[in-house]
Every structure is written in structure tokens, then in C-alpha cells.
Amino acid sequence: MNIFVGSLPFSLEESELQEFFEEYGEVTSAKIITDKFSGRSKGFGFVEMPNDEEARRAIDELNGAEVSGRTIVVNESEKREGAPRKNAPRGGKFRGGGGYKRGGGER
């Protein structure tokens, strides 16, 4: 089961996140989402647990728990249906850009 974990302290490491969930059973992965430019935590992540019963118990026990002064949110992750593919063409009528007038209009 894939588990969403939100409101994480920005200083929390993936290994620490994994340790919290290993108290309830096997963890196959623990990932904290980071900003691609700064590399800083975005304050949420995902934990994968192969046993659904253990995962549900972890969700029940850890949702609302306090970690480093923050109350975390833990629930079953929802699958993203129809998520856009990377580099997929985007729809829409307007394909202009900028916001500045282009061309030789009057000033």
C-alpha cells in the first residue's frame, strides 16, 4: 500500500521516516519529496508497505502523531488517474506568452 505522509518537519530525513513506519511492519520504500531547484523538503512524502493490514495500522496510529513539534497527516495515497505525462503536449487555445506587446504598435 502506498501511504501519503504530510506536514513533515523540513529537517526530517528519509531514514527517520522509514523508521517510524517500520515499527508497524515491513517498509519497501520511504521517499520525502524535495524541490527540484533547492533540494529542500516540501514537507510531505510517501511510504510503501507491502502488507495492507500493517499499513492500515500504521495509518491509524500515526495520523495525528507529533513529530518534532508538528502534527503529521497520514493516509492512504490516492492514485493519480489521468496524470499528464512528462513532455506531453498541452491543450488550450492560447499559446502566446510574455505579457509584453510584441510588434511595432504605437507607444
Image (cartoon, helix red, strand yellow):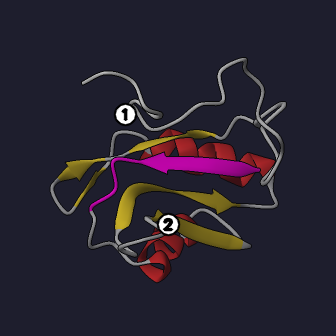
Q: Give the residue at x 37% y 34%.
A: 100
- On residue 32, the disc is 2
Q: Give amino acid for label 2.
A: Ile
Depicted 9 relative to depicted 26: above or below:
above
Q: Residues within 10 Å of mark 1 (few under 14, many from 20)?
A: few
Q: Secondary structure at mark 1?
A: loop
Q: Give amino acid for label 1.
A: Tyr
Left or right, 76 with reference to 28: left
x and y percent of residue 19 in the render? 49, 76
Quick check: marks 1 and 2 in contact, CB under 8 Å? no
x and y percent of residue 40 in the render? 34, 71
Q: How many numbered badges does the structure rendering display?
A: 2
Depicted 31 relative to depicted 74: above or below:
below
Q: Give the residue at x 84% y 31%.
A: 82
Q: CA distance from mark 1 to mark 2?
A: 39 Å
Instruction: Give whichever of discs 1 and 2 has the lower sequence position.
Output: 2
> Can the viewer see residue 26?
yes
Quadrant of the rendered image containing residue 43: bottom left
Q: Give the residue at x 21% y 51%.
A: 70
x and y percent of residue 88 in the render? 83, 46
Instruction: Judge depth for marks 1 and 2 and give the one in front.
Output: 1
In the picture, the quarter occupied by the C terminus is: top left
Q: Residue furthest toward the left? A: 69
Residue annotated with mark 1? 100
Given residues 79 and 37, the one toward you in this image is 37
Given residues 103 and 89, the one toward you in this image is 103
Looking at the rendering, the stretch of residues picked out in magenta corresponds to 1-9
> Can the viewer see residue 27?
no
